[in-house]
Every structure is written in C-alpha cells, then in structure tokens.
Amino acid sequence: MSQQILFRNFQLLEPSFGELRGGYQLLVEGDTVKQLSETPIKASDADVIDCGRRTLMPGLIDCHVHAIHSEVNVRFMEAMPLTLIAARAATRLRGDQSKEFTIRQEVVSPIEIIRSATTIGAEVLRMPGKVGTLQPGAFSDAIVVDGNPLKDLALLGDQGKHLSVIMKAGILHKNRLN
C-alpha cells in the first residue's frame, strides 16, 4: 500500500462548489485522492495533517505565460545567447506572476480566477477530473492556504509565502504544519 496522508480541520475550496465548505476530511494515497468525505475517515496508518482551519484547495495550473526580456542596447541583446535571454525573462516573470491573480480581480470574481487556474486549466490540458480538483480519483495535487483566497487573492501570490502545504502527486514539497 502507498503512503497515506489524511488532511483534517480545513475549509475546503473545491472549485466546482464555488465557496468554502467546512467539515470535510481528505485522504490521499500515493499520487491519488482516495476519499473526500463529510464524515470522519478511518485510516489508522495515515500520516495526519491538521490544517488548523486553513483553506485546502487543488493545486494551481498555469496554462499561459507572457515573458519578454529587452535591453536598451539592441546590439547587446542580439549577441546574447537565447538561454541567457530566457533566464533573464524568467527572473522578471517570477516577480510578476504572483501579481496576476490580484490584477485580474479588478474585472473577474475570485472564484472565476481560481477556476481558471484549476478546472479550466484541467480542461485545457484535457485532464478534467484528474487535475484541478480534489474529488476521488484525481491526482493528489493540493495546497493549504493561510486564509481565504476568495476574500484575498494575494494569498496565492508572494511566491508561496502564504502556503502552509504544497503537495504534488502525493509528495509534500512544503509542510509547515507538522
């Protein structure tokens, strides 16, 4: 049997619900969501993560990026290797990418922005039901947010500063809760 992780004590932000819902538990086994339940899940061998009433939601999918690097001295840039141009553009992108959610909030509701980075991203990748959701059978990609991103989308920015847990394919890449 693969490693199991049981998430408890969280507010669930499942994009299909469109709102935060409490009272759920989530069991992950290996790289797959095994169970999402409003009743206690029995998994005696599972590692337990108490989310402390934080928000648990699917991992985000970035389906588009606009990166550019320019120099005042065009001749200098023409002589630059493409890898160096890409590296410089990526450095600038990291700072701006976190701002995308808050900029879009001026014209689109927070839940629609989150859906574009979860369920709509899954459709673009032709993987609906497998990514962008925490329903059973989906890949176990999830984040735990220190607050309510429906009220403050900036929590999804700042390069993960407000994320207590980052899990990709059942592997915890960040866990400040245990």
Image (cartoon, grey):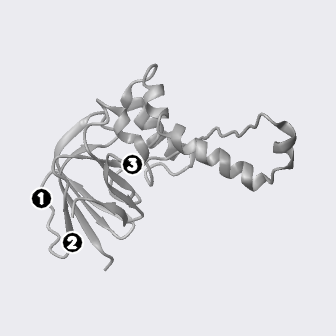
First in sequence: mark 3 or mark 1? Answer: 1
Q: Looking at the picture, which amino acid does disc 3 mark? A: Gly
Under circle 2, the secondary element is loop
| Nearer to me, 144 or 79 | 79
Q: Quadrant of residue 36?
A: bottom left
Under circle 3, the secondary element is helix
Q: Residue at x 45, y 52 (%)?
A: 131
Mark 1 surroundings within 10 Å by alpha-carbon count, few (fewer than 14), some (14 through 19), many (20 or more): few
First in sequence: mark 2 or mark 3? Answer: 2
Q: Answer above or below: position of 4 versus 156.
A: below
Mark 2 vs mark 1: give the one in front.
2
Q: Answer above or below: position of 95 versus 151.
A: below
- Describe residue 75's horizontal placement relative to residue 63 as left or right: right
Q: Looking at the picture, which amino acid does disc 1 mark? A: Pro
| Residue 167 position in % (x across, y down) | 37, 60
According to the picture, the residue beneath numbered tag 2 turns out to be 46
Q: Quadrant of residue 151?
A: top left
Under circle 1, the secondary element is loop
- Describe residue 136's horizontal placement relative to residue 43 as left or right: right
Mark 2 surroundings within 10 Å by alpha-carbon count, few (fewer than 14), some (14 through 19), many (20 or more): some
Q: Looking at the picture, which amino acid does disc 2 mark? A: Ala
- Describe residue 52's horizontal placement relative to residue 136 as left or right: left
Q: Residue at x 47, y 36 (%)?
A: 116
Q: Quadrant of residue 46?
A: bottom left
| Nearer to me, 142 or 129 | 142
Considering every residue shown, the one lying at the far top of the view is 107
According to the picture, the residue beneath numbered tag 3 turns out to be 160
Query: Where the N terminus falls, by quadrant?
Result: bottom left
| Residue 20 position in % (x across, y down) | 24, 37
According to the picture, the residue beneath numbered tag 1 turns out to be 40
